[in-house]
Image: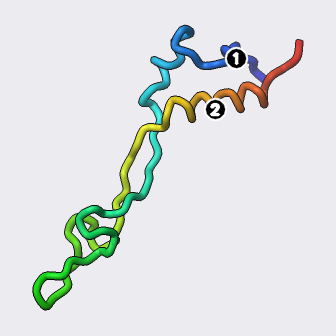
Amino acid sequence: MKKILMPAALTAENGAKALMMGEFEETISVECSECDGKGTHIYGFGSYKCEICDGDGFLTKKVPVSWTTIKEIYAMAVKHFWEEQ
């Protein structure tokens, strides 16, 4: 097994923040604000599929993983792989 040296924590001082900020994202679902999550609009006597969400009532959106979450994941990995010398 190969061994690597890693800092015990991610900090701005050791350059980790600049290296990792904006590198990770996740996809979330958000309610369509155009149709209020209904997937349809009512005009006059008819109901029409929302063109923004294509009738789904929600949209998917990519958002960056927060720096706090990145640090928590990293800390868990360090704790898991820590070797007492």
In the image, what residue type sits under mark 2? Answer: Glu
The residue beneath circle 2 is 72
Residue at 43% from the left image edge and 38% from the top image edge: 64
With respect to residue 33, does 49 lie above or below? below
Q: Secondary structure at mark 2?
A: helix
With respect to residue 32, does 38 lie above or below? below
In the rendered image, which quarter is residue 80 located in?
A: top right
x, y percent for residue 8: 70, 17
x, y percent for residue 85: 89, 12
With respect to residue 77, does 37 lie above or below? below
The residue beneath circle 1 is 8
* Other residues around mark 2 within 10 Å, as few (<14) / some (14–19) / many (≥20): some
x, y percent for residue 47: 20, 85
Left or right? Give the position of 33 relative to 65: left
> How far apart, in angstroms, are the residues tagged by discs 1 and 2?
12 Å
In the rendered image, which quarter is residue 29 located in?
A: bottom left
Residue at 49% from the left image edge and 35% from the top image edge: 66
Residue at 23% from the left image edge and 65% from the top image edge: 34
With respect to residue 29, does 12 lie above or below? above
The dot on residue 18 is none
Q: Secondary structure at mark 1?
A: loop
Residue sticking out furthest to the right: 85
